[in-house]
Amino acid sequence: MESHSKSQLSILVKKLDFVLISIVSAAALVSLIVLYSAANGELFFVKRQLFRLAIATSCMLAITMVPFETIRRHTMTFNIVCILLLIWVITHGHIGKGAQRWIDLGFFRFEPSELCKVAIPLLTARFIANCSTPIKLIDSLFLFGLISVPTVLVLLQPDLGTAIILMTVGVSAIFMAGLSHRIILVSLACAVALLPISWDYLHDYQKLRLINFFYPDNDPLGTGYHILQSKIAIGSGGIFGYGLLSGPQVRLKFIPEHYTDFVFSLIGEEFGLLGTFFVLILFAGLTIRGFMIAWQADDLFTKISIACLTLSITLSSIINISMTMGLLPVVGIPLPLISYGGSSLLTTLMAIGIIQSAKNSQQSQ
């Protein structure tokens, strides 16, 4: 029995995608280093993140061993569970920092909206795979309605950043299915036309963040504080940075949330341009590898699910990094694999596990 288990483990290790695993490992190492610095040389954050990393990695490996066809069959069940969890969060969830996004499990606060970053790509891929392509307008509208349900529930928490990612990934999948260019252009025009109307439905703090994005100097000690301090930290790091545990902005606590949403600011200040460039290379490599695996897939469900899972991770990283550099408004999106926290780490490694499972199923055919 023991030799059989070792044999299965050996086969699993051999099937793992070297590029993806190398990127995940490098990002995890970066995370532990910057969290050590964020805690001023103490191991509190590092120990907790290591525990979460062990759980998330175990989930990733377990998912890798699940046949991809099994994942496909249970896609709808997974999405229903996610919607039920989102409803539970709105009615009974833990409230923190002005939002109601978490389910408190005692030892761990879980954010169900993060699970939707895995569920939505699988849902859209399965729906499109069951339709004739190029996808018809009526089918695309029905799929848009399906995507809108979890997106609206996430908006109610409120979590604008995650809602944007979910809708963008879902709509991108519709475009991948070969929707007419004319319909795409009309849809984009309608979306732009609706932007002024959507302003009235934003919360006051969300409006302030958008105003601050365009005029950050108007309130440097209030709504503009986060972005201004983040830009100062990244810019002052120069090429090589101040060095580990030496960044003045971080040490003097001028940067809020420097271990979660603004962890990229810490990297820029202490490791400079070289450190930030290394992080960008990691996410660029993950994106390219994910789309390469999707391109090599034989069936439509596998192609779209892998592409959309990769896009979900890529969008999260782009929004977070752009946010810390003042290129996008602050929306509270963690940097995948690097920011402190369990929900984002778990769902990101779940997505990697599903991509690996899909690749394995293609190789065995």
Image (cartoon, rainbow, N blue to C red):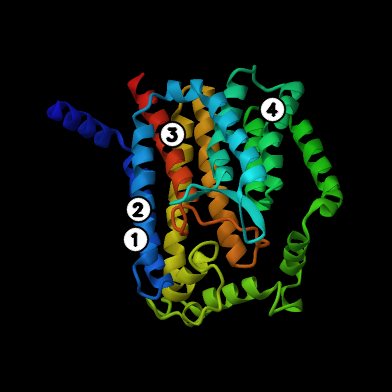
User: For the residue carrying disc 1, how many other residues have a C-alpha within 10 Å: few (<14), some (14-19), or many (20+)?
Assistant: some
- Mark closer to the observer (1, 3): 1
| Disc number lying in front (2 or 3) | 2
* Comes first in the chain, label 2 or label 3: 2
Q: Is residue 174 left or right of residue 11?
A: right
Q: In whole angstroms, how far apart are the C-alphas of marks 2 and 4? A: 38 Å
Residue drawn at (37%, 66%) of the image: 44
Which is more N-terminal, label 4 or label 2? 2
Which of the two discs, 2 and 4, sits closer to the camera? 2
Q: Earlier in the sequence, mark 3 or mark 4?
A: 4
How far from the left and from the top, in percent, is residue 186?
81, 36
Closer to the observer: label 4 or label 1? Answer: 1
- Residue at 72%, 22% (x, y): give it: 139
Q: Is residue 213 left or right of residue 19?
A: right
Q: Is residue 182 visible?
A: yes
Report if the CB atoms under discs 1 and 2 are less than 8 Å apart.
yes
Q: Which residue is mark 2?
A: 51
Which mark is drawn over residue 143? 4
**Which tag, 4 or 1, sits closer to the chain's start?**
1
Distance between the alpha carbons at the discs numbered 4 and 1 = 42 Å
Marks 2 and 3 sit apart, C-alpha to C-alpha, by: 22 Å
The residue that mark 1 highlights is 47
Q: Amino acid at mark 3?
A: Ile
Question: Three-letter amino acid code at disc 4?
Answer: Leu
Name the residue type under label 2: Phe
